[in-house]
Amino acid sequence: MATKYIFITGGVVSGLGKGIAAASIGLILKSRNLSVVNQKFDPYLNIDPGTMNPFQHGEVFVTDDGAETDLDLGHYERFTDATLSQSNNTTSGRVYETVLKNEREGKYHGGTVQVIPNVTDEILRRMLLSTEETHADVIITEIGGTVGDIESLPFIEAIRQMKYKVGEENCCYIHLTLIPFLEKANEIKTKPTQHSVKELQELGIQPDILMLRTEVPLDEATREKLAQFCNVDTDCVIQNRTAKSIYEVPLIMEDEGLGDAVCKTLHLENRASELTEWRKMVTVFENPKTSVTIALVGKYIELHDAYLSVVESLTHGGIANEASVNIAWIDSEILSDDEVTKKMLSGVDGIIVPGGFGSRGIEGMIRAAKYARTNNVPYFGICLGMQIIVIEYARNVLGWTDAHSTEIDPNTNHPVIDLMPDQNGKILGGTLRLGKFECTLLDGTLSKKAYNADIIWERHRHRYEFNNLYRKDLENAGLVIAGVNMERNLVEMVEIPKHTWMVGGQFHPEFKSRPNKAGPLFRDFIAASIKNKECRKN
Protein backbone atom coordinates (compact mmCIF):
# COMPACT_ATOMS: atom_id res chain seq x y z
CA MET A 1 0.00 0.00 0.00
CA ALA A 2 1.25 3.48 -0.85
CA THR A 3 1.87 5.73 2.15
CA LYS A 4 -1.03 8.09 2.82
CA TYR A 5 -0.58 11.70 3.93
CA ILE A 6 -2.83 13.80 6.15
CA PHE A 7 -2.26 17.54 6.49
CA ILE A 8 -3.92 19.51 9.29
CA THR A 9 -4.26 23.27 9.04
CA GLY A 10 -5.91 25.75 11.36
CA GLY A 11 -8.18 28.68 10.60
CA VAL A 12 -10.03 31.65 12.15
CA VAL A 13 -8.03 31.81 15.41
CA SER A 14 -5.04 30.09 17.00
CA GLY A 15 -5.23 27.83 20.02
CA LEU A 16 -7.98 25.55 18.71
CA GLY A 17 -6.08 22.37 19.52
CA LYS A 18 -4.55 21.20 16.24
CA GLY A 19 -2.00 19.19 18.23
CA ILE A 20 -4.71 17.29 20.11
CA ALA A 21 -6.63 16.81 16.84
CA ALA A 22 -3.53 15.43 15.10
CA ALA A 23 -2.79 13.13 18.03
CA SER A 24 -6.42 11.97 18.12
CA ILE A 25 -6.38 11.12 14.41
CA GLY A 26 -3.18 9.16 15.02
CA LEU A 27 -4.83 7.12 17.78
CA ILE A 28 -8.01 6.56 15.74
CA LEU A 29 -6.04 5.23 12.75
CA LYS A 30 -3.71 3.18 14.95
CA SER A 31 -6.81 1.59 16.52
CA ARG A 32 -7.67 0.42 12.98
CA ASN A 33 -4.37 -1.47 12.88
CA LEU A 34 -2.58 1.09 10.70
CA SER A 35 0.97 2.23 11.39
CA VAL A 36 1.03 5.97 12.00
CA VAL A 37 3.63 8.72 12.39
CA ASN A 38 2.88 12.29 13.48
CA GLN A 39 5.02 15.30 12.68
CA LYS A 40 4.86 19.07 13.23
CA PHE A 41 6.01 21.85 10.90
CA ASP A 42 6.31 25.22 12.64
CA PRO A 43 6.64 28.49 10.71
CA TYR A 44 8.76 30.39 13.25
CA LEU A 45 12.39 31.20 12.37
CA ASN A 46 14.01 29.72 15.49
CA ILE A 47 16.01 26.59 14.68
CA ASP A 48 14.12 24.82 17.46
CA PRO A 49 12.32 25.88 20.66
CA GLY A 50 15.34 24.99 22.83
CA THR A 51 16.33 28.57 23.63
CA MET A 52 12.82 30.05 23.55
CA ASN A 53 11.25 31.58 26.65
CA PRO A 54 8.82 29.09 28.26
CA PHE A 55 6.42 31.99 28.86
CA GLN A 56 6.09 32.41 25.08
CA HIS A 57 6.31 28.88 23.81
CA GLY A 58 5.49 26.53 26.67
CA GLU A 59 7.60 23.48 27.43
CA VAL A 60 10.33 22.04 25.25
CA PHE A 61 9.61 18.37 24.55
CA VAL A 62 12.74 16.22 24.30
CA THR A 63 12.92 13.05 22.22
CA ASP A 64 15.11 9.97 22.71
CA ASP A 65 17.65 11.24 20.18
CA GLY A 66 17.99 14.57 21.98
CA ALA A 67 15.85 16.79 19.74
CA GLU A 68 14.35 19.84 21.45
CA THR A 69 10.90 20.02 19.92
CA ASP A 70 7.45 21.56 20.07
CA LEU A 71 5.19 20.48 22.94
CA ASP A 72 2.70 18.98 20.47
CA LEU A 73 5.12 16.08 19.95
CA GLY A 74 4.33 15.18 23.55
CA HIS A 75 0.65 14.83 22.62
CA TYR A 76 1.59 12.68 19.63
CA GLU A 77 3.72 10.34 21.74
CA ARG A 78 1.20 10.08 24.58
CA PHE A 79 -1.76 9.34 22.30
CA THR A 80 -0.07 6.94 19.88
CA ASP A 81 2.59 5.52 22.26
CA ALA A 82 5.20 6.40 19.66
CA THR A 83 8.89 7.27 20.00
CA LEU A 84 9.50 10.30 17.82
CA SER A 85 12.77 11.88 16.74
CA GLN A 86 14.53 14.93 15.33
CA SER A 87 12.85 14.47 11.94
CA ASN A 88 9.34 14.78 13.42
CA ASN A 89 9.63 18.53 14.11
CA THR A 90 10.74 21.06 11.51
CA THR A 91 10.83 24.86 11.76
CA SER A 92 11.24 27.56 9.14
CA GLY A 93 14.57 28.31 10.80
CA ARG A 94 15.79 24.78 10.18
CA VAL A 95 14.53 24.85 6.58
CA TYR A 96 16.19 28.18 5.76
CA GLU A 97 19.38 27.12 7.55
CA THR A 98 19.64 24.11 5.24
CA VAL A 99 18.78 26.11 2.11
CA LEU A 100 21.40 28.77 2.88
CA LYS A 101 24.02 26.12 3.69
CA ASN A 102 23.28 24.45 0.34
CA GLU A 103 23.64 27.81 -1.41
CA ARG A 104 27.02 28.49 0.24
CA GLU A 105 28.22 25.03 -0.76
CA GLY A 106 27.21 25.62 -4.40
CA LYS A 107 24.55 22.93 -4.48
CA TYR A 108 22.24 25.15 -6.52
CA HIS A 109 24.96 25.58 -9.18
CA GLY A 110 24.89 29.36 -9.01
CA GLY A 111 21.16 29.65 -9.59
CA THR A 112 18.94 32.21 -7.89
CA VAL A 113 17.70 30.80 -4.58
CA GLN A 114 13.96 31.37 -4.15
CA VAL A 115 11.09 30.39 -1.88
CA ILE A 116 9.65 28.42 -4.77
CA PRO A 117 11.14 25.96 -5.60
CA ASN A 118 14.13 25.90 -3.20
CA VAL A 119 12.45 26.47 0.15
CA THR A 120 9.33 24.47 -0.72
CA ASP A 121 11.49 21.61 -2.05
CA GLU A 122 13.33 21.47 1.27
CA ILE A 123 10.01 21.43 3.14
CA LEU A 124 8.78 18.59 0.91
CA ARG A 125 12.01 16.66 1.44
CA ARG A 126 11.56 16.89 5.20
CA MET A 127 7.89 15.96 5.00
CA LEU A 128 8.86 12.75 3.20
CA LEU A 129 11.69 11.86 5.62
CA SER A 130 9.31 10.05 7.98
CA THR A 131 8.16 7.87 5.08
CA GLU A 132 11.72 6.82 4.32
CA GLU A 133 12.60 6.23 7.98
CA THR A 134 9.45 4.46 9.17
CA HIS A 135 7.55 3.17 6.08
CA ALA A 136 4.38 4.02 8.01
CA ASP A 137 0.95 3.53 6.47
CA VAL A 138 -0.09 7.10 7.30
CA ILE A 139 1.97 10.24 7.93
CA ILE A 140 0.04 12.96 9.80
CA THR A 141 1.50 16.44 9.43
CA GLU A 142 0.33 19.38 11.52
CA ILE A 143 1.08 22.81 10.06
CA GLY A 144 1.65 25.34 12.85
CA GLY A 145 0.04 28.76 12.87
CA THR A 146 -3.19 29.91 11.24
CA VAL A 147 -4.06 30.06 7.55
CA GLY A 148 -3.43 33.64 6.48
CA ASP A 149 -0.18 34.04 8.42
CA ILE A 150 2.56 35.29 6.08
CA GLU A 151 5.21 33.02 7.61
CA SER A 152 3.21 29.85 6.96
CA LEU A 153 2.75 30.43 3.21
CA PRO A 154 5.73 28.29 2.09
CA PHE A 155 4.36 25.36 4.10
CA ILE A 156 0.89 25.76 2.61
CA GLU A 157 2.42 25.83 -0.86
CA ALA A 158 4.46 22.72 -0.07
CA ILE A 159 1.43 20.70 1.04
CA ARG A 160 -0.42 21.90 -2.09
CA GLN A 161 2.40 20.48 -4.20
CA MET A 162 2.37 17.23 -2.23
CA LYS A 163 -0.90 16.19 -3.81
CA TYR A 164 0.74 16.16 -7.24
CA LYS A 165 3.89 14.51 -5.89
CA VAL A 166 2.22 11.48 -4.24
CA GLY A 167 -1.19 11.41 -5.94
CA GLU A 168 -4.54 12.95 -5.03
CA GLU A 169 -5.85 9.62 -3.68
CA ASN A 170 -2.99 9.58 -1.15
CA CYS A 171 -3.57 13.07 0.30
CA CYS A 172 -6.15 14.27 2.81
CA TYR A 173 -6.46 17.90 3.87
CA ILE A 174 -8.17 18.56 7.20
CA HIS A 175 -9.00 22.12 8.19
CA LEU A 176 -9.70 22.86 11.86
CA THR A 177 -11.68 26.05 12.46
CA LEU A 178 -13.88 27.77 15.01
CA ILE A 179 -17.67 27.96 14.86
CA PRO A 180 -18.53 30.76 17.30
CA PHE A 181 -21.84 30.84 19.16
CA LEU A 182 -23.31 34.29 19.87
CA GLU A 183 -25.17 33.87 23.11
CA LYS A 184 -27.13 37.13 22.86
CA ALA A 185 -28.40 36.21 19.42
CA ASN A 186 -28.64 32.50 20.31
CA GLU A 187 -27.03 31.80 16.96
CA ILE A 188 -24.15 29.76 15.52
CA LYS A 189 -22.00 31.69 13.04
CA THR A 190 -20.49 29.82 10.10
CA LYS A 191 -19.11 32.81 8.21
CA PRO A 192 -15.61 32.76 9.83
CA THR A 193 -15.16 29.15 8.70
CA GLN A 194 -16.41 29.95 5.20
CA HIS A 195 -13.89 32.78 4.90
CA SER A 196 -11.06 30.62 6.25
CA VAL A 197 -11.82 27.85 3.75
CA LYS A 198 -12.05 30.42 0.96
CA GLU A 199 -8.58 31.71 1.89
CA LEU A 200 -7.22 28.17 1.83
CA GLN A 201 -8.85 27.56 -1.56
CA GLU A 202 -7.21 30.72 -2.90
CA LEU A 203 -3.89 29.17 -1.93
CA GLY A 204 -4.73 26.10 -4.00
CA ILE A 205 -5.98 23.72 -1.31
CA GLN A 206 -9.49 22.30 -1.09
CA PRO A 207 -10.11 20.79 2.36
CA ASP A 208 -11.44 17.24 2.34
CA ILE A 209 -12.60 17.31 5.96
CA LEU A 210 -13.70 20.16 8.22
CA MET A 211 -13.20 19.81 11.97
CA LEU A 212 -15.28 22.42 13.73
CA ARG A 213 -14.48 23.57 17.26
CA THR A 214 -17.78 24.43 18.87
CA GLU A 215 -19.25 24.90 22.33
CA VAL A 216 -22.74 23.88 21.23
CA PRO A 217 -23.95 20.93 19.12
CA LEU A 218 -24.22 21.55 15.39
CA ASP A 219 -27.55 20.65 13.82
CA GLU A 220 -27.85 18.92 10.46
CA ALA A 221 -28.86 22.11 8.67
CA THR A 222 -25.63 23.82 9.77
CA ARG A 223 -23.55 20.87 8.64
CA GLU A 224 -25.25 20.84 5.23
CA LYS A 225 -24.79 24.59 4.86
CA LEU A 226 -21.06 24.31 5.58
CA ALA A 227 -20.71 21.33 3.29
CA GLN A 228 -22.36 23.25 0.46
CA PHE A 229 -20.47 26.52 0.95
CA CYS A 230 -17.10 24.85 1.61
CA ASN A 231 -17.41 22.18 -1.09
CA VAL A 232 -17.03 19.11 1.15
CA ASP A 233 -19.26 16.07 1.73
CA THR A 234 -21.71 16.42 4.62
CA ASP A 235 -20.28 13.34 6.36
CA CYS A 236 -16.88 15.06 6.26
CA VAL A 237 -18.12 17.98 8.39
CA ILE A 238 -17.06 16.85 11.87
CA GLN A 239 -17.96 18.76 15.00
CA ASN A 240 -15.23 18.95 17.65
CA ARG A 241 -17.06 19.69 20.89
CA THR A 242 -15.19 20.78 24.02
CA ALA A 243 -14.46 17.59 25.98
CA LYS A 244 -14.10 16.88 29.70
CA SER A 245 -10.46 16.02 29.08
CA ILE A 246 -8.07 15.84 26.15
CA TYR A 247 -8.10 12.04 26.43
CA GLU A 248 -11.81 11.98 25.64
CA VAL A 249 -11.27 13.84 22.34
CA PRO A 250 -10.31 10.82 20.17
CA LEU A 251 -13.35 8.92 21.45
CA ILE A 252 -15.64 11.83 20.60
CA MET A 253 -14.00 12.22 17.19
CA GLU A 254 -14.37 8.50 16.44
CA ASP A 255 -18.03 8.59 17.46
CA GLU A 256 -18.48 11.65 15.21
CA GLY A 257 -17.22 9.67 12.22
CA LEU A 258 -13.76 11.19 11.76
CA GLY A 259 -12.09 7.81 11.22
CA ASP A 260 -14.68 6.87 8.60
CA ALA A 261 -14.19 10.20 6.79
CA VAL A 262 -10.40 9.83 6.73
CA CYS A 263 -10.59 6.24 5.46
CA LYS A 264 -13.06 7.27 2.74
CA THR A 265 -10.91 10.19 1.59
CA LEU A 266 -7.70 8.15 1.49
CA HIS A 267 -9.32 5.01 0.01
CA LEU A 268 -8.29 2.99 3.06
CA GLU A 269 -10.01 -0.19 4.17
CA ASN A 270 -12.35 1.02 6.92
CA ARG A 271 -11.55 -1.55 9.58
CA ALA A 272 -13.33 -1.60 12.93
CA SER A 273 -11.52 0.48 15.54
CA GLU A 274 -10.28 -1.07 18.77
CA LEU A 275 -10.33 1.56 21.51
CA THR A 276 -11.47 -0.59 24.43
CA GLU A 277 -8.39 0.01 26.59
CA TRP A 278 -8.46 3.75 25.89
CA ARG A 279 -12.15 3.90 26.82
CA LYS A 280 -11.41 2.05 30.08
CA MET A 281 -8.64 4.55 30.89
CA VAL A 282 -10.95 7.52 30.24
CA THR A 283 -13.66 5.93 32.42
CA VAL A 284 -11.18 5.56 35.31
CA PHE A 285 -10.02 9.15 34.82
CA GLU A 286 -13.58 10.51 34.87
CA ASN A 287 -14.67 8.39 37.86
CA PRO A 288 -11.90 8.66 40.47
CA LYS A 289 -12.25 6.97 43.85
CA THR A 290 -10.23 9.59 45.71
CA SER A 291 -8.42 12.88 45.13
CA VAL A 292 -5.05 14.33 45.99
CA THR A 293 -3.60 17.86 46.01
CA ILE A 294 -0.09 18.36 44.66
CA ALA A 295 1.82 21.62 44.97
CA LEU A 296 3.73 22.36 41.78
CA VAL A 297 6.45 24.76 42.86
CA GLY A 298 7.95 26.41 39.81
CA LYS A 299 9.07 29.63 38.18
CA TYR A 300 6.93 29.63 35.00
CA ILE A 301 3.53 28.94 36.54
CA GLU A 302 1.81 31.88 34.82
CA LEU A 303 1.85 29.74 31.67
CA HIS A 304 0.78 26.24 32.62
CA ASP A 305 1.94 24.89 29.24
CA ALA A 306 5.51 25.45 30.46
CA TYR A 307 4.98 22.30 32.55
CA LEU A 308 2.60 20.50 30.21
CA SER A 309 4.20 17.04 30.27
CA VAL A 310 4.65 17.20 34.05
CA VAL A 311 0.97 18.04 34.52
CA GLU A 312 -0.12 15.29 32.14
CA SER A 313 2.16 12.79 33.90
CA LEU A 314 0.69 13.72 37.28
CA THR A 315 -2.71 12.99 35.72
CA HIS A 316 -1.37 9.62 34.53
CA GLY A 317 -0.16 8.89 38.06
CA GLY A 318 -3.64 9.73 39.29
CA ILE A 319 -5.27 7.40 36.74
CA ALA A 320 -2.94 4.56 37.86
CA ASN A 321 -4.14 5.15 41.45
CA GLU A 322 -7.79 5.86 40.50
CA ALA A 323 -7.42 9.37 41.87
CA SER A 324 -8.04 12.87 40.56
CA VAL A 325 -5.02 15.14 40.88
CA ASN A 326 -5.62 18.75 41.87
CA ILE A 327 -2.63 20.99 41.26
CA ALA A 328 -1.86 23.93 43.53
CA TRP A 329 0.25 26.24 41.34
CA ILE A 330 2.84 27.96 43.54
CA ASP A 331 5.29 30.57 42.29
CA SER A 332 8.54 29.71 44.03
CA GLU A 333 9.41 33.42 44.29
CA ILE A 334 6.65 33.98 46.87
CA LEU A 335 8.15 31.40 49.26
CA SER A 336 10.20 34.17 50.84
CA ASP A 337 10.78 32.55 54.26
CA ASP A 338 9.97 29.41 56.23
CA GLU A 339 6.74 30.84 57.66
CA VAL A 340 5.35 31.77 54.24
CA THR A 341 6.43 28.36 52.91
CA LYS A 342 4.63 26.57 55.75
CA LYS A 343 1.49 28.62 55.16
CA MET A 344 1.50 27.89 51.40
CA LEU A 345 2.34 24.18 51.63
CA SER A 346 0.67 22.99 54.83
CA GLY A 347 -2.51 21.87 53.07
CA VAL A 348 -0.99 19.87 50.22
CA ASP A 349 -0.51 16.10 50.01
CA GLY A 350 2.66 16.14 47.92
CA ILE A 351 5.16 18.58 46.42
CA ILE A 352 6.77 18.48 42.99
CA VAL A 353 9.57 20.77 41.80
CA PRO A 354 10.07 20.45 38.02
CA GLY A 355 12.93 21.54 35.80
CA GLY A 356 14.01 25.06 34.93
CA PHE A 357 16.97 27.28 34.19
CA GLY A 358 18.35 30.41 35.87
CA SER A 359 18.44 31.85 39.37
CA ARG A 360 14.94 33.26 39.75
CA GLY A 361 12.87 31.54 42.42
CA ILE A 362 15.61 29.08 43.45
CA GLU A 363 15.58 29.99 47.16
CA GLY A 364 11.82 29.36 47.31
CA MET A 365 12.34 25.92 45.81
CA ILE A 366 14.99 25.16 48.42
CA ARG A 367 12.54 26.17 51.17
CA ALA A 368 9.90 23.89 49.63
CA ALA A 369 12.35 20.97 49.70
CA LYS A 370 13.25 21.73 53.32
CA TYR A 371 9.56 21.81 54.26
CA ALA A 372 8.98 18.47 52.52
CA ARG A 373 12.01 16.85 54.17
CA THR A 374 11.33 18.08 57.69
CA ASN A 375 7.57 17.46 57.56
CA ASN A 376 7.69 14.07 55.85
CA VAL A 377 5.68 15.30 52.84
CA PRO A 378 6.17 13.32 49.61
CA TYR A 379 8.46 15.26 47.29
CA PHE A 380 9.38 14.63 43.67
CA GLY A 381 12.27 16.59 42.18
CA ILE A 382 12.74 16.59 38.41
CA CYS A 383 16.05 17.83 36.94
CA LEU A 384 16.46 21.16 38.76
CA GLY A 385 14.13 19.76 41.42
CA MET A 386 16.62 16.92 42.03
CA GLN A 387 19.47 19.43 42.32
CA ILE A 388 17.38 21.37 44.85
CA ILE A 389 17.27 18.26 47.09
CA VAL A 390 21.08 18.11 47.05
CA ILE A 391 21.54 21.83 47.75
CA GLU A 392 19.00 21.83 50.59
CA TYR A 393 20.54 18.72 52.17
CA ALA A 394 24.05 20.16 51.95
CA ARG A 395 22.91 23.41 53.56
CA ASN A 396 20.65 22.17 56.32
CA VAL A 397 22.04 18.73 57.18
CA LEU A 398 25.75 19.13 56.50
CA GLY A 399 25.69 22.80 57.57
CA TRP A 400 27.25 24.18 54.39
CA THR A 401 25.06 27.29 54.39
CA ASP A 402 26.48 28.61 51.11
CA ALA A 403 26.10 25.31 49.22
CA HIS A 404 24.75 25.98 45.75
CA SER A 405 24.92 25.32 42.04
CA THR A 406 27.57 27.24 40.12
CA GLU A 407 24.83 28.07 37.62
CA ILE A 408 23.40 30.33 40.34
CA ASP A 409 26.45 31.20 42.45
CA PRO A 410 29.77 30.73 40.61
CA ASN A 411 31.68 31.75 43.76
CA THR A 412 30.16 29.32 46.25
CA ASN A 413 32.64 27.45 48.47
CA HIS A 414 30.51 24.31 48.21
CA PRO A 415 29.52 23.83 44.53
CA VAL A 416 27.51 20.64 45.08
CA ILE A 417 26.05 21.14 41.59
CA ASP A 418 28.56 22.09 38.91
CA LEU A 419 29.67 21.66 35.31
CA MET A 420 31.71 18.55 34.68
CA PRO A 421 35.30 18.88 33.37
CA ASP A 422 34.33 17.57 29.90
CA GLN A 423 31.60 20.20 29.35
CA ASN A 424 33.51 22.66 27.18
CA GLY A 425 30.83 23.80 24.74
CA LYS A 426 30.63 27.54 24.32
CA ILE A 427 27.32 27.89 22.43
CA LEU A 428 24.17 28.14 24.54
CA GLY A 429 22.71 24.66 24.45
CA GLY A 430 25.99 23.14 23.27
CA THR A 431 26.84 21.76 26.71
CA LEU A 432 23.38 20.34 27.41
CA ARG A 433 23.03 16.63 28.06
CA LEU A 434 20.12 15.89 25.74
CA GLY A 435 18.18 12.74 24.96
CA LYS A 436 18.06 9.32 26.57
CA PHE A 437 20.82 8.04 28.84
CA GLU A 438 21.26 4.89 30.87
CA CYS A 439 20.87 4.80 34.65
CA THR A 440 21.73 1.89 36.95
CA LEU A 441 19.51 1.72 40.04
CA LEU A 442 20.62 0.81 43.56
CA ASP A 443 18.97 -2.14 45.30
CA GLY A 444 16.63 -1.34 48.16
CA THR A 445 15.72 2.15 46.96
CA LEU A 446 12.33 3.66 46.22
CA SER A 447 13.56 4.25 42.67
CA LYS A 448 14.38 0.58 42.12
CA LYS A 449 11.02 -0.38 43.61
CA ALA A 450 9.20 2.01 41.26
CA TYR A 451 10.89 0.82 38.06
CA ASN A 452 11.35 -2.83 39.10
CA ALA A 453 14.44 -2.90 36.90
CA ASP A 454 18.21 -2.78 37.32
CA ILE A 455 18.80 -0.41 34.40
CA ILE A 456 16.52 2.28 33.00
CA TRP A 457 16.72 4.77 30.14
CA GLU A 458 15.26 8.25 30.60
CA ARG A 459 15.48 11.52 28.68
CA HIS A 460 17.62 14.42 29.84
CA ARG A 461 17.78 18.15 29.24
CA HIS A 462 20.23 19.86 31.54
CA ARG A 463 23.74 21.29 31.76
CA TYR A 464 24.80 21.13 35.42
CA GLU A 465 25.47 17.88 37.30
CA PHE A 466 25.79 16.52 40.83
CA ASN A 467 29.40 17.28 41.81
CA ASN A 468 31.14 14.01 42.62
CA LEU A 469 33.73 15.86 44.74
CA TYR A 470 31.03 16.13 47.43
CA ARG A 471 29.48 12.72 46.92
CA LYS A 472 31.23 10.97 49.84
CA ASP A 473 30.39 13.76 52.30
CA LEU A 474 26.74 13.78 51.27
CA GLU A 475 26.48 10.00 51.41
CA ASN A 476 28.13 9.93 54.86
CA ALA A 477 25.50 12.45 55.96
CA GLY A 478 22.76 10.05 54.83
CA LEU A 479 21.87 11.16 51.29
CA VAL A 480 21.12 8.08 49.19
CA ILE A 481 22.56 7.91 45.68
CA ALA A 482 19.82 5.81 44.09
CA GLY A 483 20.88 5.85 40.44
CA VAL A 484 24.10 6.41 38.50
CA ASN A 485 25.09 6.70 34.85
CA MET A 486 27.95 4.23 34.89
CA GLU A 487 29.49 5.37 31.61
CA ARG A 488 30.40 8.81 32.98
CA ASN A 489 29.91 8.12 36.70
CA LEU A 490 27.19 10.75 36.92
CA VAL A 491 24.64 10.77 39.73
CA GLU A 492 21.17 10.42 38.21
CA MET A 493 18.92 9.84 41.23
CA VAL A 494 18.94 10.77 44.91
CA GLU A 495 16.66 9.92 47.82
CA ILE A 496 16.24 11.08 51.40
CA PRO A 497 16.40 8.18 53.89
CA LYS A 498 13.76 7.57 56.56
CA HIS A 499 11.29 9.67 54.60
CA THR A 500 7.90 8.57 53.29
CA TRP A 501 8.88 9.40 49.67
CA MET A 502 11.48 11.99 48.69
CA VAL A 503 13.04 11.22 45.33
CA GLY A 504 14.89 13.28 42.75
CA GLY A 505 15.85 12.39 39.18
CA GLN A 506 18.29 14.37 37.05
CA PHE A 507 16.27 13.28 34.01
CA HIS A 508 12.76 14.15 32.79
CA PRO A 509 10.53 11.07 33.28
CA GLU A 510 7.48 13.09 32.21
CA PHE A 511 8.49 12.70 28.56
CA LYS A 512 7.89 8.93 28.56
CA SER A 513 4.74 8.73 30.70
CA ARG A 514 1.51 7.60 29.03
CA PRO A 515 -2.13 7.99 30.15
CA ASN A 516 -2.65 4.22 30.17
CA LYS A 517 0.88 3.47 31.41
CA ALA A 518 1.97 6.07 33.94
CA GLY A 519 5.65 6.82 34.48
CA PRO A 520 6.73 4.66 37.45
CA LEU A 521 7.93 7.62 39.53
CA PHE A 522 4.72 9.57 38.94
CA ARG A 523 2.63 6.51 39.81
CA ASP A 524 4.48 5.95 43.10
CA PHE A 525 4.66 9.66 43.97
CA ILE A 526 0.87 9.98 43.67
CA ALA A 527 0.43 6.76 45.68
CA ALA A 528 2.66 8.17 48.45
CA SER A 529 0.74 11.47 48.37
CA ILE A 530 -2.59 9.65 48.72
CA LYS A 531 -1.15 7.74 51.69
CA ASN A 532 0.06 11.01 53.21
CA LYS A 533 -3.41 12.51 52.82
CA GLU A 534 -4.98 9.54 54.56
CA CYS A 535 -2.43 9.69 57.41
CA ARG A 536 -3.07 13.41 57.94
CA LYS A 537 -6.82 12.81 57.91
CA ASN A 538 -6.49 10.11 60.57
Image: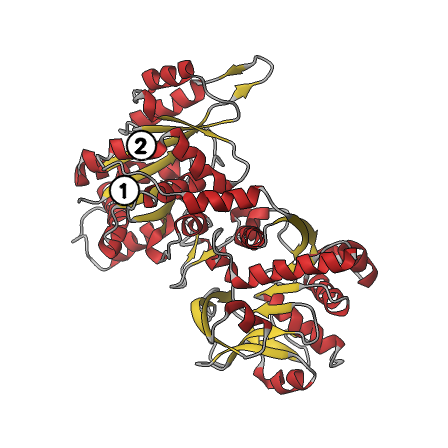
Which x, y percent locates residue 11?
42, 30
Residue 427 in view in this figure: no
Q: Which residue is drawn at 80% across and 59% down?
A: 342
Q: In this view, does 256 lie above or below 530?
A: above
Q: Kindly tell me whether residue 465 is visible in this rendering.
A: yes
For label 1, the residue is: 115
Identify the amino acid type marked 2.
Asp
Q: Do the residues labelled 1 and 2 touch (CB within 8 Å)?
A: no
Type of the residue with mark 1: Val
Is the residue marked by circle 2 packed among few (<14), some (14-19), or many (20+) residues within 10 Å? many
Number of numbered discs on residues:
2
Q: In this view, does 531 lie above or below 257?
A: below
Q: Mark 2 points at which residue?
A: 260
Mark 2: which secondary structure? Answer: helix
> Helix, strand, or loop for circle 1?
helix
Q: Which residue is drawn at 41% across and 13% down?
A: 221
Spatial CA distance of label 1 from label 2 is 36 Å
